[in-house]
Amino acid sequence: MSEVRIPVAAVKGRGIATATAHRFAPDTRGAFDDGWGTLEEAHADGEATAPPATQVTLETARSALTRNDSPDIFFDQAVNPYRGCEHGCVYCYARPTHSYLNLSPGLDFETRIIAKHNIAELLRAELARPGHVPTAINIGSATDCYQPVERELRLTRALIEVLGEARHPFSLITKSSGVERDLDLLAPLAHSRLAAAYVTITTLDARLARLLEPRAAAPHRRLRTIRALADAGVPVGVSVAPQIPFLNEDMEQVLQAARDAGATSAFYTVLRLPWELNPLMRDWLALHYPQRAARVLARVQDLHGLDEAARSAGKAYRADAASRMKGTGLWADLLRQRFVTACRRLGLNRTRIELDTSQYRPALARGQACLF
């Protein structure tokens, strides 16, 4: 996997502009100034850099459901119709998963999208298995299930149809207004306590959101999506994640706006930088916020309780299930207090969104007539 470094400003609408080598690559290559002029100079002279086109590859998946037993994740089962995400969120913890495909967690993650075209059929078969336990399934836990390619492929809608036919409870999480397309399916299922939705709003600062999440819906548009879901009777919560020290400092304002739009619950996580995401985020900070980059990274290291040896080695993440989501130490406590105080004041999280597992009908999952 080669790496060619180009100015981020030269690639409009992308979170990462470099095809960063992944951790399994046998070698790493980088551009250097050979005296004939650099890429930066060429860009300064006005030479056009063609924006990379998004490529969608159809994959025949072998399974639909993934399961976890992590105590810090609120669902046991998930289904993700896509690998990679065109939204291009620079902080996305799923970026390193592209390494398993021999693709870059950088630019490839947001331009090389893998679509599991048979995901609905696989889910139907797995729901019909005799040993299936109907706990709530989350759609879109890794990459956004309503990213732009969903408009044409409609894989998420097909998943919702299968879950609806089987009367199986599920939730979904997204940054996209595309979820409004499926309100005709979500609303009746929500009325039967079979569906819930979560919308991620990282910040209300439109400029910051444009840098962090270049192809996701604008913050004000996501608030309209919350309103549309709430008006349709779909239980909706807001995710104010990730919290990035010294960048998105408007947690309380986001919670207020989401509550006013109709959200009844909320949650947050802190920034996590596993594997290749660490250098990617460092490069992004150095470009967009050079004056505060060192402060942000130092605070992230504090949140993950890293010792001096780990800091010196450049690490910024510790995969400890007890603290990786919310952090540890003084700054984590301050974040928690801010969140809890704001939610209490706004009336958020007073009741849990409880989905009904008793309606599950295996016969319907198999496509058979239900006799009971």
Image: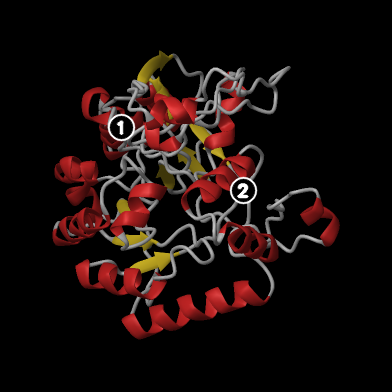
Question: Relative to 170, is 299 on the left or the right?
Answer: right
Relative image position of residue 331 (x, y in whole percent): 62, 74
Question: Which residue corresponds to the image point at 23% horizontal and 44% vertical from the top-left?
Answer: 179
Question: Relative to 68, is 173 on the left or the right?
Answer: left
Above or below for 110 versus 305: above
Relative image position of residue 41 (x, y in whole percent): 45, 29
Question: Which residue corresponds to the image point at 53% horizontal and 50% vertical from the top-left?
Answer: 285
Separation of disc 1 and disc 2 at Cα? Answer: 35 Å
Q: Earlier in the sequence, mark 1 or mark 2?
A: 1
**Which three-letter amino acid code belongs to the residue tagged 1?**
Val
Instruction: Say if mark 1 contacts mark 2, CB within 8 Å.
Output: no
Task: Report if residue 170 is visible in the image.
Answer: no
Q: Which residue is mark 2?
A: 273
Q: Badge 1 local density, few (<14 within 10 Å), some, or many (20+)? A: many
> Residue 11 or 83: which is nearer the viewer?
11
Question: Relative to 9, is 39 on the left or the right?
Answer: right
Q: Which residue is mark 1?
A: 162
| Quadrant of image for the N terminus | top right
> Residue 23 or 258: which is nearer the viewer?
23
